Image (cartoon, helix red, strand yellow):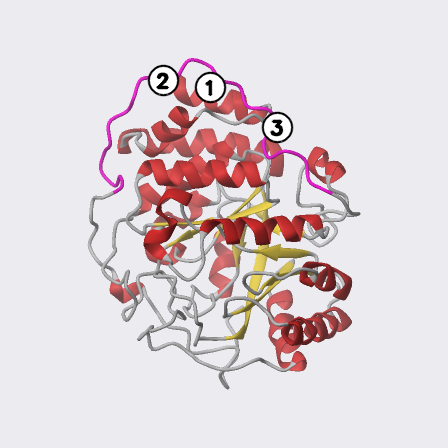
Amino acid sequence: MELLNTLVDKGLRGQTPSREEALAVLRSPDESLLEVVAAAGRVRRRWFGRRVKLNYLVNLKSGLCPEDCSYCSQRLGSKAEILKYTWLKPEEAAEAASAGVAGGAKRVCLVASGRGPTDRDVERVSKTIAAIKESNGDVEICACLGLLSAGQADRLRDAGADAYNHNLNTSEATYGDICTTHDFSDRVDTVRQAQAAGLSPCSGLIAGMGESDEDLVDVAFALRELNPDSVPVNFLIPFEGTPLAKEWHLNPRRALRVLAMVRFVCPDVEVRLAAGREVHLRSLQPLALEIANSIFLGDYLTSEGQAGQADLDMIADAGFEVEGTDTTTLPAHRAEAAEGCGSHAGGGGCGPCGGGASTPEAPEPVPATVGAAGEDEPARTDLVAVRRRGTGTDLPPNA
């Protein structure tokens, strides 16, 4: 496909595609899927080799969120039978984090449900960061606490946080369809606050909520403009008891095309394979490693993932290696432009995601095919497992 040659050429130069080219990736036929994966894989290896960064989630406070995000099992009014508990003590969180580090995680992501942290919450998380760093000094810490108020990002940075996550999730045009208690601009503002404070910005999306191809491309380009260092690609887990419980639009082939599109749009950025990979990629998870250079190890916030050892076996069997703490995640040009972010060393702002974009003649439109937006897939509710182990329980974590 001439399209793929163009995309690879741009990706190897650190440039991004046109919107028409990104749409064409999502609408490519199943018979060219392996070609799409191979093309995205060339771009991934150019900037990240065959390394896979492992990240580990610690849910500091679960459930009872006042926000109404339709995709979330912790939302206001959720009837999903998830674990609900208030703030973990710093030593409890540090113990959970140590399990992830022992499993090979380079970054620990500290997450708490809620609209955003109070100043007391920031102090709480600061003590937790100190407890984790005391026993695991080399580990990166990413906080994910919701919408930030003035000065809170600086306090988290001073406490030792390396990064801050706040996902855009979907396009600005359709954001109101999935949430009414805050808007798209609130999320953008929080990511920018983290950037301004010298935290490594982490922001991604959720696929499978009934969005169109255009919505996925719009959010990918919004992320490119926002310029995070890492982009988590989540696939909706349709929890029973949430408004999106009946939304089953993804299959493994569609999920791979979404990942490839994101890789082409932000070629030199850490693309993270995140929640829902077991549910929607299923047996094709190893192929996703050809595109994404980062994954979550073990379980997620309220759902269970595959066994941590199975993740490690999958990485090894596919010919990849776990990225060590002595390796800088981001390519040299991004690390040099952003000394101080958690995936590299130093302080300051990050360089443009993917460099300058060129605007060649747009390819011919490609018709939507099997697995494209709006085509329902069989519900695989058997693959949705609510987390019943790890933090908030008496059972050991999965790492």
Q: Which residue is mark 3?
A: 355
What amino acid type should be assigned to the residue bearing mark 3? Answer: Gly
Q: Nearer the viewer, residue 50 or 204?
A: 204
List the residue tagged with mark 2. 363
CA–CA distance between discs 2 and 3? 21 Å
How far from the left and from the top, in percent, is residue 373?
27, 41
**To which quarter of the image does residue 101 belong?**
bottom right
* CB contact under 8 Å: marks 2 and 1: yes
Per the rendered image, the range of residues in magenta is 349-373
Q: In which quadrant of the rendered view does residue 107 lie?
A: bottom right
Going 29% across and 21% down the picture, which residue do you hit?
A: 365
**Helix, strand, or loop for circle 1?**
helix
At x 66%, y 41%, the residue is 330
Q: Residue at x 50, y 24 (%)?
A: 8
| Upstream in sequence: badge 2 or badge 3 | 3
Q: Quadrant of the C terminus?
A: bottom right
Q: Which mark is residue 6?
A: 1
* Secondary element at tag 3: loop
Q: Is residue 75 above or below residue 3?
A: below
Q: Amino acid at mark 2?
A: Pro
Can the viewer see residue 202? no
**Position in image of residue 327 (x %, y %):** 72, 47
Report crowding for label 3: few under 14, some 14 to 19, many 20 or more residues within 10 A (C-alpha).
some
- Residue 271 in the image: above or below residue 199: above
